[in-house]
Image (cartoon, rainbow, N blue to C red):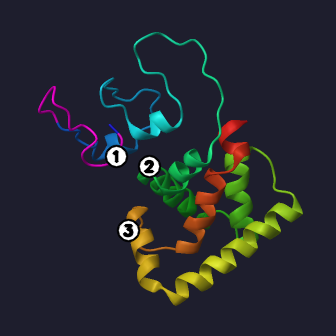
Amino acid sequence: MPHQPPGVWKTTYSGEDWKNATGGERYRRAIYTYLKRTSPHPAMTTFDAGSGEICQIRRVRTNTPLQALVTLNDLAFVEAAGALSQHMQTHGKDLAMNISEGFRRLLARVPEERELDRLMKLYHALKLLHEKDPDGAQVLMKTAGIPTGDAAMIGVANVLLNLDEFLMK
């Protein structure tokens, strides 16, 4: 039962509440999640998941701006970016190697020079932004589930998780 915004399950049909998974259950890999037809998970709706009323063999691929908002802001994706950023920081001797590791891990290829340059520029821009707003950086790290670390690397990891090549290919 991944994180879901409060109030989604408010229905007239039952008094049930969505209970977010905790502990090890919260972060386990899963193909399935609990689905209630009358109150579908918002991310599933955004990604055009079926209603569950009939079996679907295949889904149509879609890619909309609303989906990008989910992948950039949904708690599950922010937490995934936090975990990826920690992995990236422990693999490599410098920033380029750290970013390349995250890129390679997600896309199964080494980044081209121009891709790496853009991601490094993004990192430096985010680093400046977080230096100007350390409270915002702390909120991001807390949301990502990382007590200490590099908020700029979380931002880079979040962008990597939002790439069309990662999501659609």
Residue at position x 32%, y 40% from top? 25
- Residue 150 shows up from this direction: no
- Residue 39 shows up from this direction: yes
The secondary element bearing badge 3 is classed as helix
Badge 2 local density, few (<14 within 10 Å), some, or many (20+)? many
Q: In the rendered structure, which amino acid carries the disc numbered 3? A: Lys
Q: Where 168 sits versus 154, above or below?
A: above
Residue annotated with mark 1 = 3
Residue placed most toward the observer, 147 or 138: 138
Task: Report, in whole angstroms, how far the alpha carbon at label 1 lies from the one at label 2.
Answer: 7 Å
**169 is within the stretch colored magenta:** no
- Residue 53 in the image: x percent, y percent? 40, 13
The quadrant the C terminus occupies is top right
- Do tag 1 and tag 2 residues touch (Cβ < 8 Å)? yes
Give the left or right position of residue 122, taking residue 30 as reference: right
User: Based on the displayed image, in which of its 4 quarters is residue 72 positioned?
Assistant: bottom right
The secondary element bearing badge 1 is classed as loop
- Residue 36's tag is none
> Depth-wise, is mark 1 or mark 3 nearer the camera?
1
Q: Where 152 sits versus 113, above or below?
A: below
What is the number of callouts on the image? 3
The residue positioned farthest toward the front in the image shown:
12
Residue annotated with mark 3 = 142
Question: Which is more N-terminal, label 3 or label 1?
Answer: 1
The secondary element bearing badge 2 is classed as helix
- Residue 168 in the image: x percent, y percent? 69, 37
